[in-house]
Image: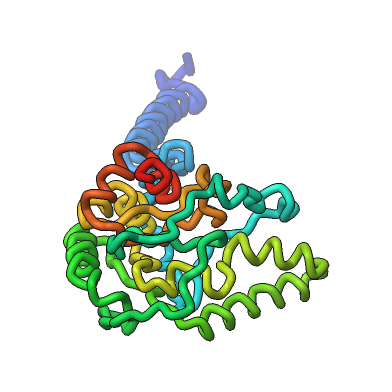
Amino acid sequence: MAANGHKPRRARIWPALLLIAVLLAACIGAVRWGLGDLVQPAPPAETGENQPAEPPVEADEPAEPAVSDEIDEPDEPDTPAEDNAADTPEEEAGTLEEDDGQWNLRLVNRWNPLPEDYEIQLAEVPGGQQVDARIYDALMELLNAATEAELGPIVVAGYRTQEKQQSIYDEKLQSYLDQGYSQEEAVAQTEQWVALPGTSEHQLGLAVDINGAVYAIYPWLQEHSWEYGFIFRYPAEKQALTGVANEEWHYRYVGKEAAQAIHEQGVCLEEYLQAQS
């Protein structure tokens, strides 16, 4: 201690420095605490794994099918013509020399051509196609039922003249020749999809090709067409008997009684007529 009773200068400075240090620490803590409330870590970015899956696309809503007034057909097989061409003898395919007045059961296929003197009275259906006038009412009932089921039915092919059928046949044949098929191969391929002129049910006036706004029309027709007197004419498994590849759009009028029997028995028209003879 100094002789005059005062503390040394250094002793007076330390308490002041200590007070300043305490106050500075307190200020720093307060600032950090305040910023902690204001600054939060950013949330993690959303990833695809946590997103809901896209709803499935309805299987019965394909693009609207193309509409043609000539012929509508599925993708054709790449297999050689010899593997798929029907080679059933005439007696096994079913014949009907006389229809005994049963016009609705007249058989027309590659083994049973249409009579040259065949005459027909036509009626026009919505869309411009024509059919045998005797099936008009039944066909309209079928189309109206499909419309009520929101299937958007349209008849894209009905009655064809000999000339029209010949034109379609020639065009198809030429398309195979252009692809490099031999004449024999082109004929075999063509006749899987287009009937020889004179052997087409379209010339009979009792057959129609029906498309729709949605693909669901085809299974609907297979399930309900018999109720209106029509049959699914060319199932894939009956090709050896009908001589025609699967055509899910082609329906033939046979009358309600025959249509019901054919549907319930799972047979084709050739088998049904063979059993009746």
Q: Name which residue lies at 55% across and 45% down.
A: 92
Note whether 198 is above or below 63 in the view shown: below
Task: Tell me the residue at 36%/36% (across/down).
Answer: 36
Q: Give the residue drawn at x 22%, y 53%.
A: 256
Instruction: Report how many numbered discs are placed on residues in the image.
Output: 0
Residue 224 screen position, x and y as percent: 25, 50
Image location (x, y in percent) of residue 261: 28, 43
Q: Is residue 66 visible?
A: yes
Considering depth in this image, is 95 or 192 the residue closer to the camera? 95
Q: Residue at x 32, y 84 (%)?
A: 128
Judging depth in this view, the residue of 41 and 223 nearest the camera is: 223
* Relative to 88, residue 117 above or below: below
Q: Residue furthest top?
A: 1
Q: Along the horizontal axis of the image, is 23 left or right of 70?
A: left
Image color mode: rainbow
Q: Residue 202: x, y in percent?
A: 43, 71
From the viewer's perspective, is residue 43 above or below residue 66? above
